[in-house]
Image (cartoon, rainbow, N blue to C red):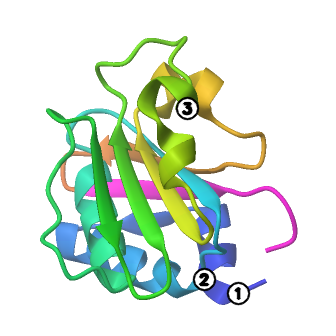
Amino acid sequence: MSEVLHELRIGVRSHSPKETVTWAERLAPKLPSDLTLCLQGPVGAGKTSFASALVKALGAADPVTSPTFNLLSVYEAATMTILHLDAYRLGKQTNSDALALDDMMQSPWLLLVEWPENVPALLPSNAWWLRFEIPEETERILRLTTRGDY
């Protein structure tokens, strides 16, 4: 198992947005293809900033924007297609057919899901979960749960 995955599984403290970006940059090269990465945490925890840094670190040339209003943004990176879904306004019964995700998820891909608890029907059993906690105003704890041998 890589060092960054080990550290994130234990849980890491980030004391600034810059540190959170650094964790995204460190995680990016360790992500397997065809992965759903759930970003879970309260408003203002840094989920979108983390996703933006991750997309950039994977080599997407297009500017990264929050998908809150259009729900889904798609980026072509050097090694994969990245789909960034903000499920804040979606219902629990939403599935991949409703969003036409299956048509876009041609291997290799990465699906980033903010507010994954709103779309349980969409999430595969092998999804990775990155939880963002806010123990203090200027501190975040990032904790990764993975499935499989990574």
Q: Residue placed at 40% from the left, 76% from the top?
A: 23
* Dot 2: element: helix
* Dot 3: element: helix
Q: Earlier in the sequence, mark 1 or mark 2?
A: 1
Q: Which residue is mark 2?
A: 30
Q: In the image, which residues are magenta?
A: 139-150
Q: Earlier in the sequence, mark 3 or mark 1?
A: 1
Sort mark 1 into few (<14), some (14-19) or many (20+) by Cα contacts within 10 Å. Answer: few
Classify 39 as above or below 78.
Answer: above
In percent of width and height, residue 146 lies at 72, 57
- The answer to whether marks 3 and 2 mark residues whose Cβ atoms lie closer than 8 Å is no
Tell me the amino acid under the disc marked 2.
Lys
Classify 128 as above or below 121.
Answer: below
- The answer to whether marks 1 and 2 mark residues whose Cβ atoms lie closer than 8 Å is yes
Please state which of residues 102 and 138 is positioned toward the viewer in this rendering: 102
Q: Which residue is mark 1?
A: 2
Q: Which residue is mark 3?
A: 96
Q: Residue placed at 60% from the left, 75% from the top?
A: 31
Image quadrant where residue 4 sits: bottom right
Image quadrant where residue 17 sits: bottom left
Residue at the limit of the structure toward the right, as seen here: 149
Classify 119 as above or below 76.
Answer: above
Foreground disc of the pair 3, 2: 3
Tell me the amino acid under the disc marked 3.
Ser
